[in-house]
């Protein structure tokens, strides 16, 4: 005999299967009659066009609204000749509004303004609404198969339709071994998923929720250069970018969802600092706005070593706001980057003897 | 061990010091000022030798001074060679360099080695030019002289001293040394820069093989000089060794035609302070060297969370090109609180780094 919870759970599964049915979502997008761009037809390595999408986290109550939203953001980038488009960390966040019980939580949040805890109170809200034994990780596992369809089907469809590279942004998804990880995907212009990246350093509350960290930094060779896309906190420390750089990355994209008030100094601690240390181009794409007690801020942009930027400030292009939806475009030159690295004798100035003396054992003290 | 320390960062202006004792005198005044502000430690900048260019120029042309004196009717041995003097007298060094009216020194390969030139202006073209044509030809007994004096001053004023970077030549190659002096024990550690600036690499400087740190003084200190600041490996290793205060001797070289760029400052030790949650006391040498402008803002820095504006800058020089002594107080207990609240180390991924470091460097090194 099925208990009530089980029936509700099964009903929700059926509901979500329909809402997130790949065929249905693709049909919706197909109706837009997208004209494939020629942005990748001819590659001029002196002028690679990058786009960072700054997206609001506002919940939507229909999948189609989300599809329209990402479609328009991609379209805006493509119309500005973008060849690589990067979405933020937790880019599927608005879709939580499609799930009835979660939608109620959004409404509750708006009604009661339960927002001012430093890193949000999502766990508390979930327990209140779903029962003491239900943790956020259970919710994430439950919705994973449906949310994954967006990354595995929708974004590849869009990258092919527009003929561009897209980094999907990330989401906390269940993996084959039952762990939940924060994962992003790189889709190629032929609609093929070229690779994934798991977040290797967790944010404080992700660890509390039971999310598992990734264990590698991947670099993918594309027509527009070698691309890596670690996630958010990964950009807090030099090692991520150093490994990506030494693996050949030219462009390092960082999907971000930063739950703190915007401050230019604090914001400078991440990708901006990292591209100064490991000379690469950096793209940051931020999720902004409020989500279940969290206030997310950030100024998305394209960054470079100081000497490769017009104003010497390390910023090629950046959004005007830290809390509104925007698409920022920038052109970068790979030969210029490679020339700069050679000019400053960057690789030659490593002191490998010192590194051999301390690495890897020194890291044991951090464990 | 104390919880609170006062750190003094020196923003030192290159002046036309003709003799080492003139420099020692200035250093003494600076230390006295820091001491009067109760500083526990004072940090001098990188490339301290640039304070003695006129002295070295004089030294390097000593064998041709006579002919210059004869030609111009001046006794350079008594007047010395002064930068920034208003004089129509050209003064020549043995490599054919000369000092012009504006006080700069330039290299002129066509000049007569006997100093019989009077119608060509000479100036130091750049820092590299000074290294190649003035310093490369000299003996660096000055470093020993000054270190001895610093040991006395540390004792007298009961202050720890980070000497800043000093040039030496060994086997016809430059190396840049730095030392840490205790008021009671003299030099307690010293070494040479482990990471080079690009121009130092071009000039074939020696690269040191040891990081400089001490866990037992001032709440545990590490020293960084010059190029070390721009390779985050150094600060990371020091952090993981338990170092809480970085003593940083820096120099920023930019074109004299460009205005000060504060982003350069952020791209320096500030980055490492944030990603390691430590304190730093950073000193700069400022002034002009031909086409190169040396600038910076000496600072005491902590993690962003430590200051209301989020910058982490506890104290900072008010200018980027004037001599100043910046003193700031840091508390180890405050640092621990921030580390506890935002435990960066805890969420690192050692297994990932161990997989790649150090082997991956060999791919490019």
Image (cartoon, rainbow, N blue to C red):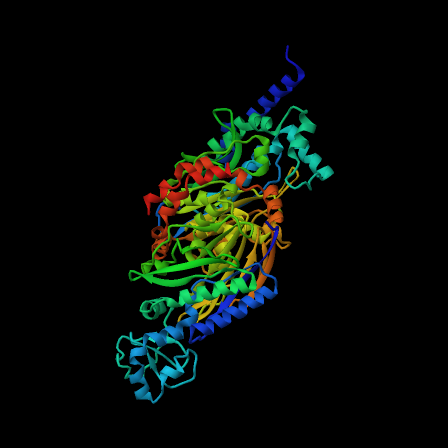
Q: Is residue B271 visible?
A: yes
Viewed as shown, does residue A265 lie left or right of A239? right
Residue closer to the observer: B216 or B296: B216
Residue closer to the observer: A14 or A290: A290
Total marks shown come to 0
Residue at figure coordinates x 50%, y 71% from the top left:
B26
State whether residue A279 is above or below residue B259.
Answer: above
Residue closer to the observer: B278 or A249: B278
Which residue is the extreme one toward the right?
A112
Residue closer to the observer: A183 or A271: A271
State whether residue B140 is above or below residue A9.
Answer: below
Quadrant of the rendered image containing residue A93? top right
Where does residue A327 sit, x and y in percent of width and height? 52, 48
Which residue is the extreme one toward the top?
A1
Where does residue B14 sit, x and y in percent of width and height? 46, 71
Residue at figure coordinates x 44%, y 47% from the top left:
B233
Where does residue A199 sit, x and y in percent of width and height? 49, 37
Where does residue A20 sit, x and y in percent of width and height? 54, 28
Viewed as shown, does residue B328 lie left or right of B163? right
């Amino acid at each position: 005999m099925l208990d009530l919870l089980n029936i509700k759970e099964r009903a929700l599964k059926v509901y979500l299967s329909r809402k997130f049915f790949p065929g249905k979502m693709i049909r919706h997008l197909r109706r837009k009659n997208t004209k494939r761009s020629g942005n990748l037809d001819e590659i001029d390595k002196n002028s690679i066009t990058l786009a960072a999408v700054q997206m609001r986290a506002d919940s939507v109550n229909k999948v189609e609204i989300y599809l329209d939203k990402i479609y328009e953001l991609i379209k805006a980038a493509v119309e500005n000749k973008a060849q690589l488009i990067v979405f933020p960390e937790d880019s599927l966040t608005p879709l939580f509004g499609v799930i009835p019980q979660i939608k109620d939580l959004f409404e509750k949040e708006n009604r009661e303004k339960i927002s001012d805890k430093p890193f949000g109170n999502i766990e508390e809200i979930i327990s209140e609404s779903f029962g003491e034994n239900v943790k956020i990780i259970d919710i994430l596992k439950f919705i994973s198969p449906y949310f994954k369809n967006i990354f595995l089907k929708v974004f590849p469809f869009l990258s092919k339709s527009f003929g561009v590279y897209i980094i999907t942004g990330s989401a906390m998804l269940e993996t084959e071994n039952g762990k939940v990880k924060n994962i992003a995907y790189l889709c190629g212009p032929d609609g093929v998923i070229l690779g994934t990246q798991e977040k290797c350093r967790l944010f404080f509350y992700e660890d509390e929720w039971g999310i598992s960290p990734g264990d590698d930094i991947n670099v993918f060779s594309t027509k527009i250069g070698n691309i890596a896309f670690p996630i958010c906190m990964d950009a807090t420390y030099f090692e991520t970018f150093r490994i990506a750089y030494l693996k050949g990355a030219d462009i390092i994209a960082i999907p971000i969802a930063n739950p703190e008030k915007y401050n230019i100094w604090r914001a400078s601690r991440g990708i901006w600092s990292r591209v100064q240390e490991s000379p690469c181009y950096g793209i940051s794409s931020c999720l902004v706005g409020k989500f279940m007690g969290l206030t997310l801020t950030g100024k998305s942009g394209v960054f470079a070593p100081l000497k490769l930027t017009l104003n010497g400030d390390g910023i090629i292009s950046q959004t005007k706001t830290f809390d509104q939806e925007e698409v920022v475009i920038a052109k970068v030159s790979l030969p210029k980057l490679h020339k700069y690295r050679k000019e400053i004798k960057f690789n030659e100035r490593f002191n490998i003897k010192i590194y051999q003396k301390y690495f890897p054992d020194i890291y044991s003290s951090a464990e | 061990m104390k919880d609170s320390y006062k750190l003094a960062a020196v923003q030192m202006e290159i002046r036309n010091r003709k003799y080492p004792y003139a420099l020692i005198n200035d250093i003494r005044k600076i230390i006295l000022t820091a001491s009067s502000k109760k500083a526990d430690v004072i940090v001098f900048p990188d490339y301290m030798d640039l304070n003695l260019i006129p002295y070295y120029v004089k030294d390097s042309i000593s064998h041709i001074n006579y002919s210059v004196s004869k030609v111009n009717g001046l006794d350079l041995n008594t007047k010395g060679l002064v930068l920034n003097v208003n004089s129509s007298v050209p003064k020549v060094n043995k490599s054919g360099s000369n000092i012009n009216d504006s006080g700069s020194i330039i290299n002129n390969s066509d000049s007569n080695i006997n100093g019989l030139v009077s119608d060509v202006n000479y100036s130091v073209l750049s820092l590299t030019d000074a290294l190649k044509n003035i310093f490369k030809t000299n003996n660096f007994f000055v470093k020993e002289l000054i270190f001895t004096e610093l040991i006395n001053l540390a004792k007298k004023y009961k202050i720890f001293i980070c000497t800043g970077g000093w040039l030496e030549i060994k086997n016809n190659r430059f190396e840049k040394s730095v030392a840490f002096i205790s008021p009671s024990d003299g030099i307690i550690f010293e070494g040479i820069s482990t990471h080079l600036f690009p121009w130092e690499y071009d000039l074939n400087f020696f690269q040191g093989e040891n990081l400089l740190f001490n866990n037992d003084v001032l709440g545990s200190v590490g020293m960084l000089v010059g190029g070390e600041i721009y390779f985050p490996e150094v600060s990371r290793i020091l952090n993981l060794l338990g170092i809480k205060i970085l003593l940083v001797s820096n120099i920023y070289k930019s074109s004299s035609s460009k205005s000060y760029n504060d982003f350069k400052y952020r791209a320096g030790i500030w980055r490492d302070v944030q990603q390691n949650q430590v304190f730093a006391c950073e000193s700069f040498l400022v002034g002009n060297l031909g086409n190169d402008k040396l600038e910076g803002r000496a600072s005491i820095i902590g993690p962003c969370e430590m200051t209301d504006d989020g910058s982490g800058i506890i104290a900072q020089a008010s200018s980027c090109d004037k001599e100043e002594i910046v003193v700031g107080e840091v508390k180890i207990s405050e640092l621990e609180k921030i580390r506890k609240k935002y435990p960066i180390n805890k969420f690192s991924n050692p297994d990932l780094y161990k997989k790649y470091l150090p082997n991956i460097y060999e791919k490019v090194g």
